[in-house]
Amino acid sequence: MIRLERVSREYRTGAHVVHALREVDVAVERGEFVMLMGPSGSGKSTLLNVIGCLDRPTSGLYRLDGEEVTALPEPSLVRIRREKLGFVFQTFHLVPRLTALRNVELPMVFAGVPAREQRDRARRALDAVGLSPRATHRPDELSGGERQRVAIARALVMDPPVLLADEPTGNLDSVSGGEIVKLLGDLNRRGRTIVMVTHDEGIARVGHRRVRLRDGRIEPGEGP
Amino acid sequence: MNPRDLFGLAGGALAAHRVRTRLTVAAVAIGVAAVLLLTSLGTSARDYVVRQFAGIGANLIGIVPGRVETTGGPPLAAGTERPLTLDDAEALVRRIPAVTLMAPLALAVTSVEAGGLSRAVTVVGSTPEFVPIRALAMAAGSNLPAMDSHSTAQVCVLGARLRRELFGDRNPLGEAVRVAESRFRVIGLLAPKGMSLGVDLDEMVLVPVANVLRLTNRPGLFRIAVQCRSFEDVPALEADVRRVLADRHGEEDFTVLTQQAVMASLARIVGLLTAALAAIAAISLGVAGIGVMNVMLVAVAERTPEVGLMKAVGASRGQVLALFLTEAAALSLGGGVAGVVLGLAGAQAVEVFVPALRMASPVWAIEAALGVSLLVGLVFGALPAVRAARLMPVEALRGRR
């Protein structure tokens, strides 16, 4: 499903060059639940952003679902983000002025889904994360856990094969966090490929496999 | 993205940032209103100057009989010149559409008597148009009646001093005065004016022109005065007058008098005022544009993370641009319309306080102000969004600019 070969990502900050990723090789099979782990600054979020097509690698090859992504022009990346990938952020990134339902509809708005279908699919997605009763609330009227469920519903509403989550429990208490992880586990059991960043060893055990990064490199022993 | 979603999202964003929306609309409105008000002020100031010059006769032409020229030796054939007649005068009105007012003029100096008092004054024979052409005002009663210029109605209008000398404090309206040997009924009184072009307008009596021609027993007029709308039309009018009269007389045996010096300086002043007006318009448009630009840049730039999120959930650059363009267009249009209303109201207010300035907001100023504010609003509303949309989503989400 996901193949990265010798992928590097460098940032230039003034005179410095920060090597966020150094020739990383990662492979994730369809239906896997992979945990990306490592101390802060190890490059795990950068790796997830590259996988999610939110960032471009400086060098290396990235193949998603058989498609060579690294070389694709912007319009193709837009299509891949719409159809292949759902992204969940640590800080939710909900649009504060929109209701939960409307936030979930947002990807369909850009995909050009007809209005009636948007509503139906958004309701079903909210239902799937157990948030139907809160559909008309705005993010600031929801708890952290509820917000993250809205974000997950938004990531799933286009029914992408791959779900990416960047420390989805990082801003939640342990109870809400546990529920989110359980939800992700359920989604994975129903066939969704999930890659999730976390630094919580307890949560990481939910995944099938852990990939550890340090200083932009995959730590040996638990390689691809 | 269907239109319902486009307008829904754009409208929602405007409603959610109420303060920013109001500030932006206000910035655009103030810019547009300033442009309108300033150009209206400039235009009306220029018109005011032109009107003042019109008051001293810049848009007047005089025609006198005889050719003013220097020839060698003594005049050869005296009496070849033909007089200017009432028919000549009426032909000018009939055949030249640009003529707004025309007054034939015949003069005689004779005694005017009333109640045993007698005074030698200038008798001005003309038509009712003489009063507006000379910028005179009626103090009481009525002007000469509108009439055929051949009419010899025995009515007259008295100059201010002549009235005082003959009647003192009595009301002369309806009384009779004797001019030369004829009785004239006083129907109107002129407001004081003073000397003008060699005639003491306070010490005169105005009667229908044919009376004076009969009194002097000559067919020729002293002068014909012709007025057009604006001093800028004078050269064309002058050419028309020459053509019509030469046509009637078979040769140019008359002289056309224009106020060359006045017209030349007026043209210079108006040219300067027009240039100043253009500068005022350009500066105020520029200032308004910069104001709109600043508000737009700030308003959109701080939403870079939102652009990042949109892209992360599958928005294309074009869709981001469409959203922000819709917002910017709504802000600019709203502000523009408010600004036009504000500017027109401001112009009205100025006119209330300074009635001498007849404020007219030029249509080109409205168009230019709206056009510039829309253009600037769209460009600077969309530019930061385009920039943000070019970033990779992760950079935009971090709020990097």
Image (cartoon, grey):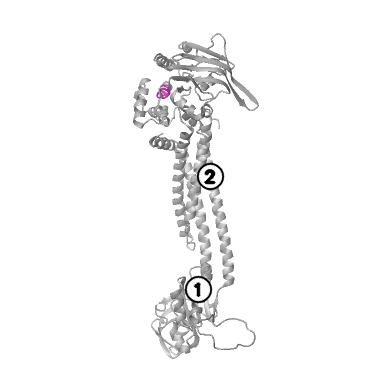
Q: Relative to B23, is B392 above or below? A: above
- Residue pictured at 51% horizontal, 41% vertical: B379
Instruction: Identify the image quadrant of the N terminus of chain B.
Output: top left
**Does residue B135 appear in the picture of this structure?**
no
- B96 or B128, which lies in front? B96
* Residue A150 forms part of the magenta stretch: yes
Viewer-closest of A218 and A95: A218
- Judge whether residue B142 is colored magenta: no
Tell me the subunit letter for badge 2.
Answer: B
Number of the label disc, if any, that sits on residue B291: 2
Q: Which mark is residue A98?
A: none
For mark 2, does the 10 Å Cα neighbourhood hold few (<14), some (14 to 19), or many (20 or more) residues?
A: some
What residue lies at 55% left-to-right and 83% top-to-bottom? Answer: B66
Q: Is residue B375 above or below residue B189?
A: above
Amino acid type at circle 2 is: Gly
Give whichever of discs 2 and 1 has the lower sequence position: 1
The location of residue B16, given as percent across then percent down, is: 43, 35
Please state the chain letter of the residue tagged with numbered disc 1 in the rendered image.
B
In front: mark 2 or mark 1? 1
The circle drawn on residue B240 is 1
Label 2: element kind: helix
Residue A60 horizontal/vertical position (percent): 57, 20
The C terminus of chain B appears in which quarter of the rendering? top right
Between B168 and B291, the one nearer to me in the picture: B291
Q: In which image quadrant can residue A144 be found?
A: top left
Q: Can residue B362 be seen here?
A: yes
Tag 1: amino acid: Asp
Tags 2 and 1 both on a single chain: yes
Compute the Cα span from label 2 to label 1: 52 Å
Report the magenta stretch's main SS. helix
